[in-house]
Image (spheres, rainbow, N blue to C red):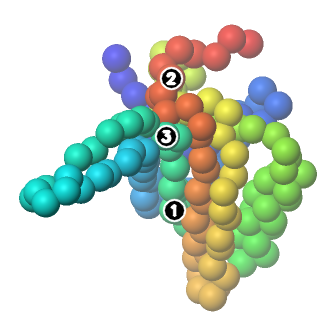
Amino acid sequence: MSMQFQPGVTVAGTFRQLPGPVTKLQVQDHWDFDRFQPLLGDGDHTVGLARQGVDVSIQGTVAMRGNLLLLSEAEMFAEVQTLRQLFQSQAEALFDVYLFRDETTETCRYFKQCSVARFQYDLTQPELYSYSLVFHADDPTIYSVWPAA
């Protein structure tokens, strides 16, 4: 089984690959718990350990959209604005965030129903714009079942 690194999101059932190359993708798991210190004793006692949602942090440059090379500053800016508009127009919507996706083998790994927590972009280098996205998935499960059409 081959997996193809292809970060992207689904919007209204349509897959949209993120601009690339993606330089960093981090998945941050979180746990919730209470910690107590025993009276007159060393150490502590942890109770109520429960897994919380997951943050998916993606950093990349705006050099390509799929296989199309973005050469001009105007093209890179248009791509950033397209992403910005996508996330603003879908403010209440939830996205499936893909880490790996290969249409030919129908292999994928993704988080379901994620919300956009932050979108930052840097326009100070006219030769190559960069961006950072943070999604939050309430469900910490990484799904591998190809979504039904």
Residue at the front extreme, as displayed: 40
Mark 1 neighbour density, 10 Å: few (under 14) some (14–19) many (20 or more):
many
Q: CA distance from mark 2 to mark 3?
A: 16 Å
Q: CA distance from mark 1 to mark 2?
A: 22 Å
Kindly identify the amino acid type of the residue bearing the numbered disc 1.
Answer: Gln
Q: Which residue is mark 2?
A: 143
Would residue 94 be seen by someone viewing this image from the given angle?
yes
Q: Secondary structure at mark 1?
A: strand
Tell me if label 1 and label 2 are in contact, CB under 8 Å: no
Q: Is residue 126 above or below residue 49?
A: below
Report the residue marked by disc 3. 52
User: Which residue does the image show at 38% across and 48% down from the upper left?
Assistant: 34
- Is residue 105 found left or right of 43 in the rendered image? right
What secondary structure is marked by label 2? loop
Q: Position of residue 81 (x, y in %)?
A: 81, 65
Q: Nearer the viewer, mark 1 or mark 2?
A: 2
Looking at the rendered image, the quarter that the N terminus falls into is top left
Splitting the image into 4 quarters, where does residue 48 fall? top left
Residue located beneath label 1 in the image:
59
Residue found 50% across the figure and 23% down from its top? 143
Instruction: Please state which amino acid type lies under the numbered disc 2.
Output: Tyr
The residue furthest bottom is: 124
With 60 as the anchor, is 96 left or right in this view? right
Badge 3 marks a residue whose secondary structure is strand
| Residue type beneath disc 3 | Gln
**Residue at 60%, 37% in the rendered image:** 138
Sequence-wise, the earlier of marks 2 and 3 is 3
Mark 2 crowd level (few <14, some 14–19, many ≥20, 10 Å Cα): some
Quadrant where the image shows the C terminus: top right
Are there few (<14), some (14-19), or many (20+) residues within 10 Å of tag 3? some
